[in-house]
Image: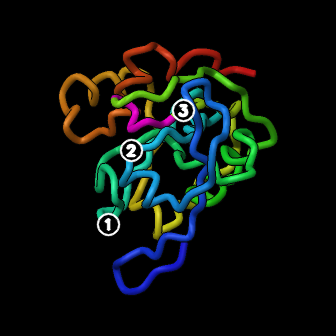
């Protein structure tokens, strides 16, 4: 995404989908969000060899949830892009990590609660690579154990993205972390 000063220039094109997650049209991201149209996104959970989960802190100039702690990598599925491909792309764009495999964990249907996003959640296997956060996307990050994430969700939910809290509440953040 190109930048002019602090403002982002929107160059992402997304597929608008119907209630069954089938493509209907292709539109610019900002228009899709302005009209609250259903579209697709991916969330990726990155684990280290000790099964700790990497959380990223979003940059403060992000349109949604600026400065909040989020799952390892998140983003939109671009028009014509497969969800798995989008997960790998987001993981690399945000953390400079190349995952050999991503495993689908869960699919969440689009609703007002998700910002009309049909979300596919993926996880990596144990990863030896050290994340190198892209400063245009991520301000910092850290690997956390289950009890540390639980403490954040209970004590500081206002500092976390709704996606992180939703998938924590569904019990999906620390399942199947060993490949």
User: Is 137 rendered above or below residue 44?
Assistant: below
Q: Is residue 114 magenta?
A: yes
Residue identified by numbered label 3: 119
Q: Residue at x 22, y 22 (%)?
A: 154
> Residue 30: horizontal and vertical position, in percent?
43, 61
Q: Which residues are magenta?
A: 113-117
User: Is 133 rendered above or below residue 108?
Assistant: below
Residue identified by numbered label 1: 61
> Residue 143: horizontal and vertical position, in percent?
48, 40
Q: Quadrant of residue 162?
A: top left
Q: Nearer the viewer, residue 54 or 74?
A: 74
> Residue 166: horizontal and vertical position, in percent?
38, 24
The answer to the question of whether label 1 and label 2 lie on touching residues, with beta carbons closer than 8 A, is: no
Q: Give the quarter of the figure containing the N terminus.
A: bottom right
The answer to the question of whether label 3 and label 2 lie on touching residues, with beta carbons closer than 8 A, is: no
Q: Determine which of the numbered discs, if any, sits on residue 36 in the image.
A: 2
**Mark 2, other Cα within 10 Å: few <14 / some 14–19 / many ≥20:** some
Could you tell which of marks 3 and 2 lies nearer the N-terminus?
2
**Mark 3, other Cα within 10 Å: few <14 / some 14–19 / many ≥20:** many
Using residue 175 as the reference point, say whether residue 89 is left or right of it. Answer: right
Using residue 47 as the reference point, say whether residue 35 is left or right of it. Answer: left
């Amino acid at each position: 995404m190109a930048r002019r000063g602090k403002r982002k220039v929107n160059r992402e094109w997304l597929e608008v989908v119907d209630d069954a997650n089938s493509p209907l049209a292709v539109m610019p991201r900002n228009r899709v969000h302005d009209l609250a149209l259903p579209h697709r996104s991916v969330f990726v959970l990155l684990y280290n060899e000790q099964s700790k989960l990497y959380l990223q802190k979003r940059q403060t100039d992000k349109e949604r949830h600026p400065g909040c702690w989020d799952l390892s990598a998140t983003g939109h599925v671009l028009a014509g892009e497969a969800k798995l491909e989008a997960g790998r792309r987001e993981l690399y764009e945000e953390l400079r990590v190349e995952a050999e495999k991503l495993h689908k964990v869960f699919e969440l249907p689009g609703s007002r609660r998700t910002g009309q996003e049909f979300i596919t959640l993926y996880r990596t296997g144990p990863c030896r690579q050290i994340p190198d956060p892209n400063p245009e996307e991520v301000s910092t990050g850290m690997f956390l154990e289950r009890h540390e994430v639980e403490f954040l969700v209970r004590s500081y939910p206002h500092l976390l993205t709704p996606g992180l809290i939703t998938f924590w509440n569904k019990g999906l953040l620390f399942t199947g972390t060993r490949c």
